Structure formats: structure tokens, C-alpha cells
Image: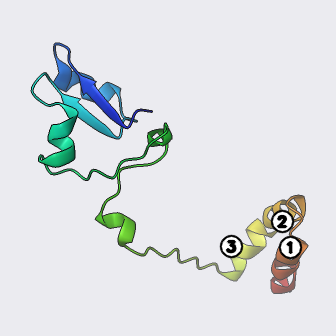
Amino acid sequence: APEHLELLIEDARDAVRKVPRAAAVFVGHHAPVPVGDYLAGPNHTLPTGGTARFASPLSASDFVRRQNVIEYGPQQLAADARSIEALAHAEGLHGHAVAVEVRKK
């Protein structure tokens, strides 16, 4: 996926949705890369080397700490224990399987 993509075609605005992986898309003949890099306002810190296929430009959200919270009840754990234990053993994380096993009792 490209770091910068200039769409110098008719209906360039409509074409933007067809290239969702480009990090920065410059639409039309009057939007060269330096406009975005220096003046238009988007962040100039873009994923390079094709990494735009799975990464986004740097933004304020990169500095926001997120947290996953998982809560399970006894019935939920009992219903899923076998699958969790099988996955843990398959990964060689036997302690994870034991952590589930002891909580089932």
C-alpha cells in the first residue's frame, strides 16, 4: 500500500473509496504531495514501505491508552473452558490451561 497516492484522473474524488489502504490520497491536479506534507493539515507521519496496508497515519489516538476489560461468570467459563484449554495446550501454554482448570472446580 502506498504512503502517498495522487489521483490525477477524472472523477478522482469517487476513486478515493477504491483505494482504502493508501496512507494519504491527494485528489486532483491541484493537490500535489507537498500540499499535504506542508500545509493542508493532515499529519505528515505516514506508514512507509507498504505498511499502509495494515497501519494508519500517526494521530492523536496513537497517544490514547486503551484497555481491554474481560469479565466472565462461572457459567461462561464452564461453557468455554474446553476450547480455552485446547488452545492453551496447542500453544504450549499449559499454565493457561491449568488456570482455567482450577477455576472450574
Between 18 and 42, the one lying in front of the other is 42
Label 3 CA crowd tier, 10 Å (few <14, some 14–19, many 20+): few
- Measured as percent of width and height from the top left, residue 25 is found at 26, 34
Looking at the image, do the residues carrying marks 2 and 1 touch, with CB atoms under 8 Å apart? yes
Looking at the image, the residue that sits furthest to the top is: 10
Label 2 CA crowd tier, 10 Å (few <14, some 14–19, many 20+): some
- Measured as percent of width and height from the top left, residue 65 is found at 42, 75
Q: Is residue 17 above or below residue 61?
A: above
Q: Residue at x 19, y 42 (%)?
A: 36
SS for dot 2: helix
Q: Is residue 55 above or below residue 18?
A: below
Q: Residue at x 25, y 26 (%)?
A: 6
Reading the image, the residue beneath label 3 is: 76
SS for dot 1: helix
SS for dot 3: helix
Reading the image, the residue beneath label 1 is: 97
Mark 2 vs mark 1, CA separation in Å: 5 Å
Between 95 and 42, the one lying in front of the other is 42
- Measured as percent of width and height from the top left, residue 4 is found at 32, 34
Q: Quadrant of the C terminus?
A: bottom right
Residue 78 sits in which quadrant?
Answer: bottom right
* Colour convention of the picture: rainbow
Mark 2 vs mark 3, CA separation in Å: 17 Å
Kind of residue sitting beneath label 2: Ala
Kind of residue sitting beneath label 1: Ala
